[in-house]
Amino acid sequence: MIGGGSWGTAFARLLAMAGHETTLVCRDRDQAHAVATHHRNPRYLFDVELPETLGAAWLHDAQLSSAELVAMAVPSRGFAETLALLAPGLGDDAALLSLTKGLDPATHRRMSEVLETVAPRDRIAVLSGPNHAEEVARDYPTASVLASDSIDLARRLQAAVSTSRLRVYASTDVVGVELCAAAKNVMALAAGVSDGLGFGDNAKAAIITRGMAEMARMGEAFGAKPRTYSGMAGMGDLVATCTSQLSRNRRAGELLAKGVPSDWIEQEIGQVAEGLTTAPALRDLARDNGLELPITEAVCSVADGTMTALEALAGLMAREPVEE
């Protein structure tokens, strides 16, 4: 399990408790030592006891050649760099699973497309859904979707990671699952801005509904399956991320509304808010393909300081009336 943040830690714990021989690979040597020695992550989910069977390793010492599965929960902005570092040590038959919900900020590629630089598509899968790390780490009931171009791989990993508290659905819509995962974080920023401005449920419901329309429009342009958008990666994750007090991206939106600069927000939250990285990448990808994403555009304008939150809202409300 590559990535010692909240989600990587929670997923590594889940795999270890499911009986898999699992190693949590951390970028920081001291963090890896603490996990291996004290069975707790000193930086993330520090109040959650980890199984004694869960191993830990420093990124530069990780031995991957015998791993059947290499899962990555690395922020999108560091995903490609981390993969390049690990690639020489990967086994020829290892399955690669992305848990990262974002787009590469430099190339606008989905994470599975980044993984394709080191492995064929039939060895690559992605997992997404309404799966807050804090809840997964405490064994709250959760459902997710796992997608691969290879349905055999999707079903094999589905069986491997499913537990009595994690229900996993298999899919072959990699594009749809990944675009949902990226875009829902941007919509959560918008929902957080609404919360930060003190608006109510009507505004939140409008953001979720019109946000889903944007997400589906993007998915249609890239060949995603419509049913994905009504499933766990789409509506499920969108609702959770836009409404939960655990949502980093919703919290980041609140801070944007209060005038906190975007480059200060992650320091304030103490964790990565993927929407801040993904929003401009999603906007540019949409522009390159002639797509109109007004909520995404508004979020980018607030995040880069071009507009205040109220000015962005006024722009959205003043758009030409259309049929739903």
Image (cartoon, rainbow, N blue to C red):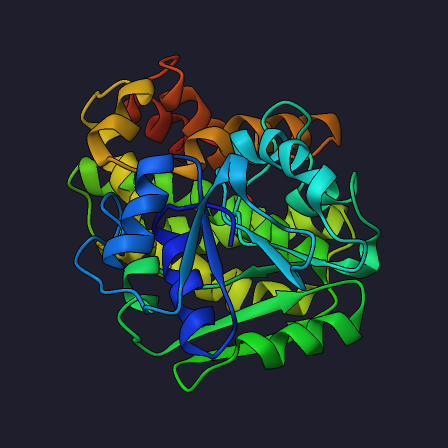
**Percent position (x, y) of residue 229?**
59, 63
Residue at 58% over, 36% down: 79
Nearest the eye: 227 or 3? 3
Residue at 39% over, 82% down: 165
> Which image quadrant: the C terminus?
bottom right
Residue at 30% over, 76% down: 140
**Percent position (x, y) of residue 308?**
29, 19
Nearest the eye: 6 or 298? 6
Farthest residue, direction bottom: 164
Quadrant in the picture for residue 300:
top left
Query: Is residue 323 visible to the viewer in this orientation of the structure?
Result: no
Position above or below: 62 against 171: above
Position above or below: 164 against 315: below
294 with respect to 124 (left or right): left
Quadrant in the picture for residue 96:
bottom right
**Percent position (x, y) of residue 78?**
53, 31
Position above or below: 241 against 29: below
Position above or below: 295 against 220: above
Farthest residue, direction top: 306
Query: Is residue 119 visible to the viewer in this orientation of the structure?
Result: yes
Quadrant in the picture for residue 95:
bottom right
Nearest the eye: 36 or 121? 36
**Percent position (x, y) of residue 228?**
63, 66
